[in-house]
Image (cartoon, rainbow, N blue to C red):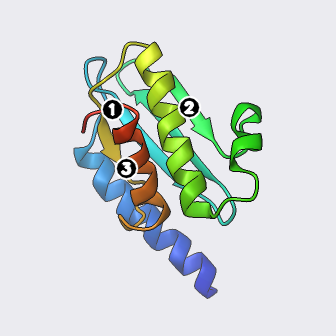
């Protein structure tokens, strides 16, 4: 097993461990983060219904022009603000933050701060 596979497996284990505790409801959905090498994705999920209420990412056509030429942490902050706006338009203000097994710093932290600036509370 290569180093990348071990790293990916360790993240999956951490995420499963967190998901045992963190569960999104209709009153307080889960703000999930997925970070790839070049992009970042965020979803607001109601786990009781199994529905995605709002989402945003760096590959989103509406955000692609805004994030062009910025650093990846600045891109994550813009994605956080966008997902917050979309969640607020869906009637969601309180969320539970699910960092997806990633460390809470860098792009994940920037996305969380951007969504707080956008009006989400967690």
Residue 76 location, x and y as percent?
Answer: 54, 52
User: Mark 1 falls on what kind of element?
Assistant: loop
Q: Nearer the viewer, residue 46 or 94?
A: 94
- Residue visible at 69% across and 38% down? 63
Question: Where residue 39 sits: x, y (%)?
Answer: 66, 56
**SS at badge 2:** strand
Label 1 sits on residue: 120
Q: How many marks?
A: 3
Q: Which residue is mark 2?
A: 55
Q: Earlier in the sequence, mark 1 or mark 3?
A: 3
- Label 2: how many residues lie within 10 Å, few (<14), some (14-19) or many (20+)? many
**Splitting the image into 4 quarters, where does residue 60 fall?**
top right
The disc label shown at residue 113, or none:
3
Estimate the x, y position of residue 25 in percent, counting from the top left.
Answer: 29, 24
User: Which quarter of the rendered picture does the C terminus lie within?
Assistant: top left
For the N terminus, give its image quadrant: bottom right
Residue 110 is left or right of residue 70, and the answer is left
Q: Are marks 1 and 3 in contact (CB under 8 Å)?
A: no
Please tell me which of labels 2 and 3 falls first in the chain: 2
Q: Residue at x 51, y 23 (%)?
A: 86
Residue 51 seen from this side:
no
Residue at (44% x, 23% y) in the render: 87
User: Would you identify the image quadrant in which residue 17 lies?
Assistant: bottom left
Pointer 1 and pointer 2: residues touching (CB < 8 Å)?
no
Asked if residue 111 is positioned above or below residue 29 in the image, the reply reads below
The residue at the point 45 percent across, 67 percent down is 106
**Is residue 45 or residue 113 the one in the foreground?**
113
Q: Nearer the viewer, residue 89 or 24?
A: 89
Tell me which numbered mark, 1 or 2, is placed earlier along the sequence: 2
Asked whether residue 93 appears in the rendered view, the answer is yes
């Amino acid at each position: 097993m290569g180093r990348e596979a071990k790293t990916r497996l360790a993240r999956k284990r951490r995420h499963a461990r967190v998901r045992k505790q963190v569960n999104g409801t209709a009153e307080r959905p889960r703000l999930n983060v997925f970070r790839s090498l070049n992009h970042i994705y965020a979803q607001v999920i109601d786990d009781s219904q199994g529905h995605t209420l709002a989402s945003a990412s760096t590959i989103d056509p509406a955000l692609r022009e805004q994030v062009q030429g910025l650093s990846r942490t600045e891109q994550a902050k813009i994605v956080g603000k966008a997902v917050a706006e979309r969640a607020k338009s869906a009637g969601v203000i309180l969320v539970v933050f699910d960092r997806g097994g990633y460390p809470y710093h860098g792009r994940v932290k920037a996305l969380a701060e951007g969504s707080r600036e956008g009006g989400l509370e967690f």
